[in-house]
Amino acid sequence: MDQKPPNNALATPDNPHSGVDLGPLDHTNSGDVAHQGDDIAVRGGTMWNHVIIVCAGFAVMFTTCAFIFAFGVYQALYEEMVQEAHSPFAGQSTARIGLIGTLAVALMSMGGPLAMSWAKLWSPQAVIVAGGWVFGIAYILASFSQRLWHFALTQGVLLGIGTCMAYVPTMSVAPTWFDQRRGLAMGIIISGSAVGGIVWPPALRAIITHLGFRNALRISGCISLSVVSAAGYILRWEPKFQEQLRAQNQSLNRRSGWIKVPLVNWRVASSRRFIAQALGCFLQSAGYSTPLFFYAAYARTLGYSAATADNFITVSNASNFVSRILIGYGADKLGRLNALAFTTLFSTIAVFAFWLPSMFQQSTVSPSSAEGLFIVFTILYGAFASAYISLFPASLIELFGVQHFTSVNGVLYLIRGMGALIGTPLTGMLIPQSTALVSSIVYERAGIVCGVLLFAATLACFWVRIEATLGEFGRWKA
């Protein structure tokens, strides 16, 4: 077995024993992986360990992230309630209502460094279970809200914190168990949010119709609390990775360690590949959520009923489910960084080629053509845009090595959250007041900004790919 460089070594082809290791743990082809004594895929134990880790991760995504990204159902409902004099949303703008979902999505990533620190200091199980309780309580408290700011605090801030505590450790545990099938494993886990996205929008719409939206919030809270608590108990670090953490934690004071975040080594943080990856994840996050939150509301401007408009969220998630598994499998064969770059490119093309043209139905496109363009956009965007979420953590070990994984992962999730917090409100402000939503053309400026952000993210992803190639003697697969 080859001697690995120490944790403070820069694994460059010319000097493998100096600086900081920015290389992956294992650069072998997947076919040679069985011969590596230190292989992550071998260290984790039996196939059963891998199966239950994937199933537990799937369950967490099925509830937390799926409910977050099903916010489009509530976005459309709350916009309808703007016209009701005594509703919590009377007279509110689209941007202010959208801030609820934006806060949840942003905080789900921005708390990444703290969530990672807690998972390292105590255990991922403890953090995920606690996150499940916070998530469930947030929904239940939201059901009693009477003002917009009440919803922003509960369905926004508190829900985002609970999601972060469950989501970030879950997405960090799984990569430590896999190597040659890491992309496939992460694709299956994150597809839980897609399956939940298929199930929850019509279920929520039915509950809202028959029991009211407040009971829908309470039921969502009870379901998520139960499922996440049960699944979180299973999700633990891979044994050898856990031993590394124990050695690192010996010098930490548990009383004060919970407020300390894992800092990225300066040599890593100042490297071009880190800067490129940080830029890409910020820009992708800034543009990603806008279509997700406005699927249903935008569909209403094309003439669809409320129930039919919600089905676009379901269609997007159905496409998302299939693509995440297929793209994850393909990424293991063709390279995770390759897949990251090209799926981001295809999501950009979907915005400019299909979503934006569908907005001009009153001038250049017939209503039926606009509907067809939006359907195609929904399928393509669901397939390619969300692939970034599963490929992003899987690519970090490739780029920075296992010894820097937890610190880099936490900081980059923070950067993703900042992107969502800035990008989604910005595009929401470009949409006129809810009372003016009578034509699809009002989404034009928001769609253009979304497309530009994703195009810039695409350039950053290809920059990451080039940096990985330069560091590996032109190795194409990465």
Image: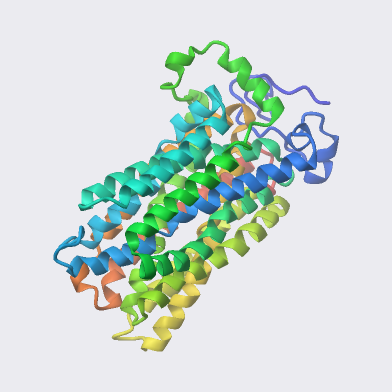
Q: Nearer the viewer, residue 269 or 446?
A: 446
> Residue 360, located in which quarter of the rendered image?
bottom left
Left or right, 208 with reference to 50:
left
| Identity of the residue furthest to the front in this view | 211
The answer to whether 234 is drawn above or below residue 155 in the figure is: above
Residue sitting at x 24%, y 78%: 438
| Identity of the residue furthest to the right in this view | 35
Location of the N terminus (image quadrant): top right
Q: Position of residue 307 (x, y in %)?
A: 40, 75
The answer to whether 436 is drawn above or below residue 50 in the figure is: below
The answer to whether 413 is drawn above or below residue 77 in the figure is: above
Left or right, 293 with reference to 429:
right
Q: Position of residue 335 (x, y in %)?
A: 67, 50
> Residue 164, located in which quarter of the rendered image?
top left
Q: Nearer the viewer, residue 270 or 412?
A: 412
The answer to whether 69 is drawn above or below residue 279 in the figure is: below
Residue 477 shows up from this direction = yes
Q: Position of residue 455 (x, y in %)?
A: 44, 58
Residue 415 shows up from this direction = no
Q: Nearer the viewer, residue 281 or 96?
A: 96
Q: Position of residue 308 (x, y in %)?
A: 42, 77
Q: Nearer the viewer, residue 226 or 380?
A: 226
Residue sitting at x 32%, y 67%: 76
Residue sitting at x 72%, y 42%: 50
